[in-house]
Image (cartoon, helix red, strand yellow):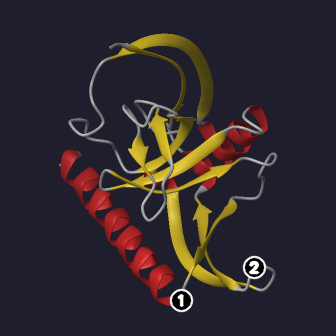
C-alpha cells in the first residue's frame, strides 16, 4: 500500500548567521518505505497520526503511532543545548531545548504555521515524544513535557547530548 504525505521542507542556506535565508515549500510525495527500514536524521519532525498503526513510528513507552516527514524541521545540529527541569504544574520533569539563531528562526516560523499539528523528536530512529503545537514558540527555547521521572529525564538528556556531539563531529569531518 502506498502512503501519500504532504511534506513541508524548511531549508537554511547559511553564508554566515547574519546572511541566512529561510524558505519553505509544500509538495506531495509518495512514500513507500516502511519506517522500520528507514533511517531518520536526528531532529524535530512534523508528524501525522497513524491510526492504522502500520506505517508509523511508535512513541517510546506509549501506544501512539505517527508518520514522520522525510526530513526534519529542525535537524539536531541546530540545538545548542538540552537540560531537564522540574515542571511544578505537572509535578514531573520536562526536557528543555535551546536552539541556535538559525534553529530559533526556523522553529518560530514552523510553530506559527503549524499550530494544532503534531511535532516530535526523533533520536537514533526512535520517536521520543510527540506533542501538539499550541502556538508560535519564539525566543529559541522549547520544552517537551512527557511526564518524565527524574531518571528518565536524565537519561534522555544524556542520549540527546551525545547525539548532538556525534552529529557535530560528523559535520566537522565532512568539511575536512
123 relative to 165, above or below = above
- In the image: residue 122, left or right of residue 81: left
**Label 1 Cα neighbours within 10 Å, binned few <14 / some 14-19 / many ≥20:** some
Q: Between residue 33 and residue 71, name the one nearer to us.
A: 33
Q: Between residue 99 and residue 63, name the one nearer to us.
A: 63
Q: Position of residue 117 (x, y in %)?
A: 69, 37
Q: Which residue is mark 2?
A: 90
Q: Which is nearer the N-term, disc 2 or disc 1?
A: 2
**Residue ID at (59%, 45%):** 119
**Residue ID at (34%, 44%):** 41
Q: Quadrant of the N terminus?
A: top left
64 relative to 2, above or below = below
- In the image: residue 88, left or right of residue 144: right
Q: Which mark is residue 46?
A: none
> What is the secondary structure assignment of the residue under circle 2?
loop
Q: Position of residue 18 (x, y in %)?
A: 63, 43
Corner quadrant of residue 170 = bottom left
**Residue ID at (39%, 44%):** 57
**Residue ID at (38%, 78%):** 158
> What is the secondary structure assignment of the residue under circle 1?
helix
Amino acid at each position: 500500500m502506498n502512503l501519500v504525505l504532504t511534506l513541508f521542507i524548511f531549508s537554511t542556506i547559511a553564508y554566515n548567521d547574519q546572511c541566512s535565508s529561510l524558505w519553505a515549500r509544500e509538495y506531495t510525495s509518495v512514500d513507500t518505505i516502511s519506517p522500520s527500514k528507514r533511517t531518520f536524521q536526528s531532529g524535530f519532525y512534523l508528524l501525522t497520526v497513524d491510526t492504522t498503526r502500520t506505517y508509523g513510528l511508535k512513541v517510546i513507552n506509549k501506544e501512539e503511532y505517527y508518520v514522520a516527514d522525510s526530513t526534519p524541521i529542525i535537524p539536531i545540529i541546530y540545538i545548542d543545548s538540552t537540560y531537564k527541569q522540574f515542571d511544578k504544574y505537572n509535578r514531573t520533569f520536562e526536557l528543555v531545548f535551546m536552539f541556535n539563531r538559525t534553529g530559533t528562526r526556523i522553529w518560530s516560523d514552523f510553530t506559527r504555521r503549524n499550530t494544532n499539528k503534531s511535532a516530535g523528536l526523533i533520536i537514533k530512529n526512535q520517536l521520543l515524544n510527540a506533542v501538539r503545537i499550541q502556538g508560535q514558540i519564539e525566543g529559541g527555547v522549547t520544552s517537551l513535557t512527557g511526564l518524565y521521572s527524574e531518571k528518565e529525564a536524565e537519561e534522555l538528556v544524556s542520549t540527546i547530548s551525545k547525539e548532538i556531539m556525534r552529529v557535530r563531529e560528523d559535520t566537522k569531518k565532512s568539511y575536512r
